């Protein structure tokens, strides 16, 4: 050791250098790990993100329809079918009326 420095002063200086060296080695190891495994981790994270996208709207529609059907009782289902049939019949009558008026206008113009 240097004879000019007392031993008590050399101890803390060596300890701080040793702690700094340990910290630098740890940072170097982290950087090496990132260089070696970083691209693979990024690829895996991207694959995971692609796998966890929300389901398509078709699946959501099916789930909503299933939930709706599960909530209906038989009477409610029968009423719903009756209303749909009634609406379909009215639509057919509307189309027939439109065609009849169109045919009448065509005959009148000639």
Image: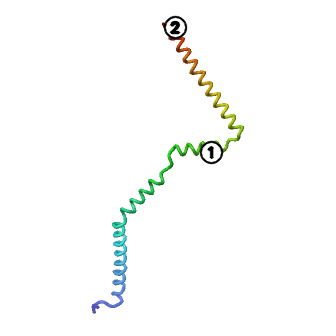
For disc 2, the marked residue is 108
| Residue in the foreground of this view, choosing between 93 and 41 | 93
Dot 2: what SS? helix
Q: Position of residue 74 (x, y in %)?
A: 71, 39
Q: Position of residue 72 (x, y in %)?
A: 68, 41
* The residue positioned farthest toward the right in the image shown: 75
Query: Count of labels shown?
Result: 2
Mark 1 or mark 2, earlier in chain: 1
Q: Position of residue 31 (x, y in %)?
A: 34, 69
The quadrant holding residue 93 is: top right
Badge 2 density bin: few <14, some 14–19, many ≥20, Cα 10 Å: few
Badge 1 density bin: few <14, some 14–19, many ≥20, Cα 10 Å: few
For disc 1, the marked residue is 67
38 in relation to 77, above or below: below
Write the residue at 32% across / 91% down: 6
| Residue in the foreground of this view, choosing between 48 and 1 | 48
Q: Position of residue 15 (x, y in %)?
A: 36, 83
Dot 1: what SS? helix
Write the residue at 50% across / 11% down: 106
């Amino acid at each position: 050791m240097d004879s000019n420095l007392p031993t008590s002063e050399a101890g803390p200086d060596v300890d701080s250098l040793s702690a700094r060296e340990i910290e630098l080695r740890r940072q170097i190891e982290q950087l090496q790990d990132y260089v070696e495994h970083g691209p693979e981790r990024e690829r895996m994270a991207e694959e995971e993100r692609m796998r966890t996208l929300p389901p398509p709207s078709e699946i959501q529609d099916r789930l909503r329809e299933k939930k709706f059907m599960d909530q209906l009782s038989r009477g409610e289902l029968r009423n719903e079918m009756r209303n749909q049939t009634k609406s379909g019949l009215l639509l057919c009558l509307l189309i027939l009326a439109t065609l009849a008026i169109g045919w009448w206008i065509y005959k009148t113009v000639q």
